[in-house]
Amino acid sequence: MANPLHGVEAYVFDVFGTVVDWYGSVTRQLAELGGSQSEDWGSFAEEWRQGYREYTARVANGGKGSTNVDIMHREILDGMLESPRWKHLAPDWDDAKRQEAVYFWHKLDGWPDSSNGLRRMKEKAIIGTLSNGSVRLLVNMAKHANLPWDVVFSGELLGSYKPDPKVYLGAIHYLGAPAEKCAMVAAHIHDLRAAAKHGMKTVYVRRPTEDGNLRQQVKSKAEGGEVDIVVDSFDELAAAM
């Protein structure tokens, strides 16, 4: 059987959840900042992330909002601290503390296979981000988690958020390669479906915090599914290349 990744020259990656463990990293940092062991910081992180999903979807569909993720995260955080569930935290969260929390998203730890797997892939192809994160956030995160990107594509740089077509098409344009020679790598099936609409190859990575029960149902085209390949780690993907 032919290798479904044959001819791919460039791989672009969703970052939050696919390359880095946003949930574990943000939950840990919140606990350190908040100081309260009784607070459900995991739920706080999940609600913050859900706000991110809703905000980016709104902008991708033409709604109002910033394409700078730091501004977005601060707006969501401020809203959460005014909500009935979290308003008890607000008196202790001054402007400086809120900004410190916003920058937690710049310091997310990679999954155990991320750094080594990306380095192996980098020897064979161009690798870069295609993330809704802003440029400085993605660069800071790369330094923190030792992620060896060749290029950083972001929603901020391309003027919208995924799944807006211009994000995928913009990356393809700047990579200077036909869409079929570019692959989108993500732990989110909706991201890959959007990329496939523009002719990109698709790689699904199973990650424990992403896609819920759906991640066990995603199959490769060889198995009758909709993505080109399914892997459990970047080392597995590097070997498949």
Image (cartoon, helix red, strand yellow):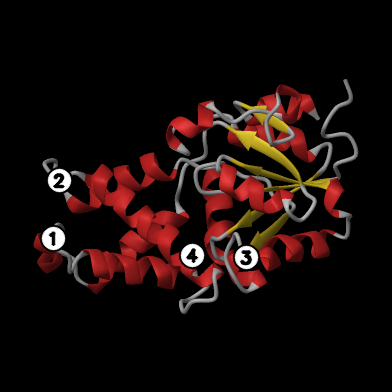
Residues tagged 1 and 2 counted as in contact (Cβ below 8 A): yes
173 on left or right of 54: right
Residue at the spot x=25%, y=73% of the render?
95
Residue type at the position of mark 4: Thr
- Which element type, helix, strand or loop, lies under badge 1? helix
Inter-mark Cα distance, 3 to 2: 36 Å
Residue type at the position of mark 2: Glu
Q: Quadrant of the C terminus?
A: top right
Can residue 175 be seen in this snapshot?
yes
Residue type at the position of mark 1: Leu
Q: Which residue is mark 2?
A: 39
Which is nearer the N-term, disc 4 or disc 3? 4
Q: Which residue is mark 4?
A: 56
Q: Nearer the viewer, residue 36 or 158?
A: 158
Inter-mark Cα distance, 4 to 3: 10 Å
Residues tagged 1 and 3 counted as in contact (Cβ below 8 A): no
Inter-mark Cα distance, 4 to 1: 26 Å
Which is nearer the N-term, disc 4 or disc 1? 4
**Is 157 rendered above or below residue 12?**
below
